[in-house]
Image: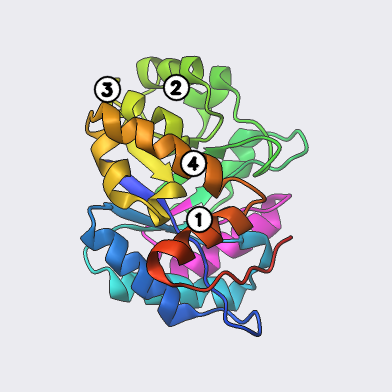
Amino acid sequence: MWQGVAVALVTFFDGDAEVDVSGTAQHAARLVEAGVRAVVVGGTTGESDALTLDERGALVAAVKDACPGVPVVAGAGGQWTRPAAEVASAVVKAGADAILVPPPRRPTDLAAFYAALPHDVPVIGYHFPGVAGGEIPLDGLAALPLAGVKDSSGDPERLLREVSTWDGAVYSGSAPLALMAGAVGAAGVILAVANVAPEDCVAAHGGDGAAQVRLLSTHRRAKALFPHGLKAAVAERYGTSTVTRLG
């Protein structure tokens, strides 16, 4: 498990809405050069709901090749055990170093759900209820077969409880909590805004208050009409495609 800032990587599409595998991998490489310590491919920010299994695998393989020595984490969700396990197996086969998996939206036995996934690589739970599946209850976290958890709730009290009561790796998915996550001993952050402002993400997580303040405007723009606001912000800085398959 890595320490520091990871990017929740966007997926680029060409004018025909086909996945731009090489362009996406090149973007990951430049973010790593800017200080990002891990790359999450095919997660919520990567428009995972609009990707086929083959596209997910191709993206994982290309990013891994473009970012040697950097952990590549692949999104692997599903609304029940079998589809989640199928996605997880496919991305692990493609070379993912870890998988990021939200719970199903409907109530289920979370321990059994996570235990049924392939554990060849670390499994990271994803708490972002209402956006990426269901809830990971804090009271049951210790009983789950997880190496880490990404918490995108933006709830500072929950983040403090996770860090203070659980031995796994805790990653905040909230840009406004980047500085706090670093200060209270979280393993790191996994941020969509790192696609646009990787330097400020790294600085804020390292304790730079001014960088944390700067991130707020980037964060607000990036989350507007998601994923359009984020794609527009990335394009403004790097000249990349704004095409999406969602929305």
Quadrant location of the C terminus?
A: bottom right
Res. 211 image quadrant? top left
Q: Which residue does the numbered mark 1 point to in the structure image?
A: 118
Residue flagged by tag 2: what amino acid is it? Leu
Q: Which residue does the numbered mark 4 point to in the structure image?
A: 219
Q: Residue shown at 68%/69% (left/top)? A: 245
Q: Residue shown at 34%/27% (left/top)? A: 181
Q: Upstream in the sequence, badge 2 or badge 4? A: 2
Do the residues under discs 2 and 1 have CB atoms within 8 angstroms?
A: no
Could you tell me how far apart the alpha carbons at marks 2 and 4 are, in whole angstroms? Answer: 19 Å
Q: Upstream in the sequence, badge 3 or badge 1? A: 1
Q: Upstream in the sequence, badge 3 or badge 2? A: 2
Quadrant location of the N terminus?
A: top left
Magenta part of the chain: 76-99
Residue flagged by tag 1: what amino acid is it? Pro
Q: Which residue does the numbered mark 3 point to in the structure image?
A: 183
Q: Which residue does the numbered mark 2 point to in the structure image?
A: 159
Could you tell me how far apart the alpha carbons at marks 3 and 2 are, in whole angstroms? Answer: 12 Å
Spot occupied by residue 156 in the image (x, y as percentages of width and height): 47, 19
Could you tell me how far apart the alpha carbons at marks 4 and 3 are, in whole angstroms? Answer: 20 Å
Do the residues under discs 3 and 1 have CB atoms within 8 angstroms?
A: no
Q: Is residue 115 magenta?
A: no
Residue flagged by tag 3: what amino acid is it? Ala
Q: Nearer the viewer, mark 1 or mark 4?
A: 4
